[in-house]
Image (cartoon, grey):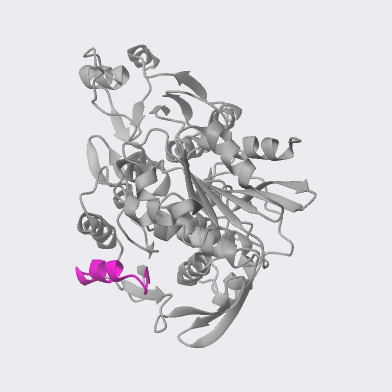
Amino acid sequence: MHIHILGICGTFMGGLAALAREAGHTVTGCDAGVYPPMSDQLRALGIELIEGFGADQLALKPDVFVVGNVVSRAHLADGSAKFPLMEAILDAGVAYTSGPQWLAEHVLHGRHVIAIAGTHGKTTTTAMTTWILEAVGTQPGFLVGGVPLNFGVSARLGGRASAGSAPCPPPALQAPPLPALNPVPPRNPLFVIEADEYDTAFFDKRSKFVHYRPRTAVLNNLEFDHADIFDDLTAIERQFHHLVRTVPGRGPHGSGRVIVNGLEESLARVLHQGCWSEVRSFGAAVSDFTAHGNDSDFDVLQQGQVVGHVSWALTGTHNQLNALAAIAAADHVGVAPSVAAQALGQFENVKRRMELRGTVHTASGDITVFDDFAHHPTAIRTTVDGLRKTLQPGQRILAVFEPRSNTMKLGTLKSQLPWSLENADLAFCHSGGLGWDANEALAPMGPRAVVADNIATLVEQVSRAARGGDQILCMSNGGFGGVHAKLLQALSSPT
């Protein structure tokens, strides 16, 4: 079929476009501010991109319009529609659907879906789970909200790819594929998907993940976020329970499994609303899957018995928990925990997750710049804490961040920022576009926190404060105005 995607440059919709193209469909799409790298990736796949949402695109006459959740019925100040193409679609009465629904009907149907949900760690845990399954030779399909470094792409069909499609570049395995304890039956191809709780479309306000119908569901963690669409934590818990309702029950062969973080009271409340599937837990002392050791070198225990060991370059307790979740998910499809743990030793993380952007050599020592996707206060704290554990005495963390997510722009969680930055030596906040006073919110940090309303001033502040041995950690869920390259340039320039 021919599908035309509205909002094609978003991470999810761009991944959907790649899957559709790989499956042999004709794909076109539109977005506002079409820009690299997503635009380059899509054009490389032969996907035509159109700038804007003009009503004239109705003339393309696709079989169906696939609508991203960036699209709304909003109107501009002059009374004209913000998305005239959507108004034309509705007026003409032609076929349209949401991205998650199209994905469910045309890609996920008939597969064993492993859905990774949670406020934090979805992308990383999805990538970990996919890598484990790839390492044992199952060739899973996947859709990740980022680019796993082991694969170099954010989405692929996997085992059900058509014969004429271009396969994903093979991963750089350091050893032959690892053995699966019980190989997954070929009739049941695997698909691992990042399961987002954000709403589906302007005409479907359910969370995206209710469309995926997983047989394995991971509930990684849950706290308040997305204040633009959820009133409170209870509202998000209700959506997570909708996901739990879609998982198959306890069959004779353990048909459906819900994997839950045993440290999260909010998830306990979700399951208390009703659960019909096999449940496996991780993280807490009494959980099915636990870890013993430091973040980068630890034993994996299943019901108190050591069943594997993970040794890798990742840091942070959050990544240790992500690993346990991925191991529990792989266990459900027959991969022994010992094998899964071994595979994680070759896991290379995801772009923009503690990604090294560069090092500047100075007379007093090296200054290193990292990029991370952290934007929620809890994610900021766990990222800072993970980096802190790797430092030598005398090294400092300079946390450079922008409150860019819809929740942070609203100021809903601003009071948590001093707590999230507690283990940073200095904090630099980009306050451009905020409707609240960042100086006031960060006042409890005293002189350790600095605020700038533009990138140029921010770069000047950071480069002036930096000294040899410092680790500069840039955190944002956006492009952050290219601050990483600008910092490296400023630090490299002679004073």
Where is residue 395 shown, x and y percent of the image?
A: 66, 61
Q: Quadrant of the C terminus?
A: top right
Residue 112 appears in the figure: no
Q: Nearer the viewer, residue 226 or 443?
A: 443
Q: Which residue is situated farthest in the bottom direction here? A: 305
Q: Residue at x 46, y 19 (%)?
A: 50
Q: Quadrant of residue 393?
A: bottom right
Where is residue 467 shown, x and y percent of the image?
A: 68, 50
Q: Quadrant of the N terminus?
A: top left
148 up-or-down from 47: above or below? below
- Answer with left or right where residue 437 lies relative to residue 400: left
Q: Is residue 491 magenta?
A: no
Q: Residue at x 51, y 37 (%)?
A: 480
Q: Nearer the viewer, residue 190 or 11?
A: 11
- Answer with left or right where residue 418 lies relative to residue 413: right
Q: Quadrant of residue 118?
A: bottom left
203 up-or-down from 423: above or below? above
Q: Which residues are magenta?
A: 259-275
Q: Nearer the viewer, residue 48 or 406?
A: 406
